Amino acid sequence: NPTEATSVFRVGLGQLGANELTLTWTSQTGVSYVVETAATLTPSSFQPAGPAVTGDGTVKSATVAVTGVTGFLRVRAQR
């Protein structure tokens, strides 16, 4: 929650495989999370890496295919 000073969003690297990596985070009920990837940091270059993950207050994860040696990931949260 960006309006709450004590609210923090942390993403952990759950597992790194040869061609994939798994991200984990504690979700909030009513929030939908989308992991996005891009080759550059241009905001319009980010594309969903999979389906949205619905938060329910538990730890959630998403596995992302890794292609190439460089790239960027972000987790977009939306109500």
Image (cartoon, rainbow, N blue to C red):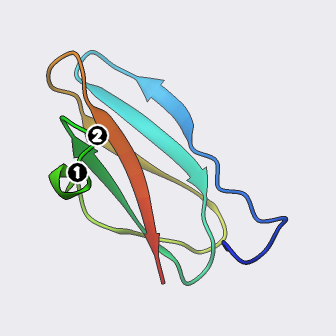
Q: Residue at x 58, y 51 (%)?
A: 25
Give the secondary structure at mark 2.
strand
Towards the viewer: 71 or 17: 71
Choose the circle earlier in sequence order: 2 or 1: 1
Q: Name, please, the residue furthest toward the right.
A: 6
* Nearest the eye: 5 or 33: 5
Question: Does the image show residue 48?
Answer: no
Which label is found at residue 49? 1
Snapshot quadrant of residue 68: top left
Residue 17 seen in the current view: yes
Q: Badge 2: few (under 14), some or many (20 or more) residues near its Cα, within 10 Å?
A: some
**Residue under circle 2?**
64
Residue at 53% from the left image edge and 45% from the top image edge: 24
**Type of residue at label 2?**
Val
Asked if residue 4 lies left or right of residue 12, the reply is right
The image shows residue 69 at horizontal and vertical percentages of 21, 15
**Up/down of 41 relative to 17, above or below:** below
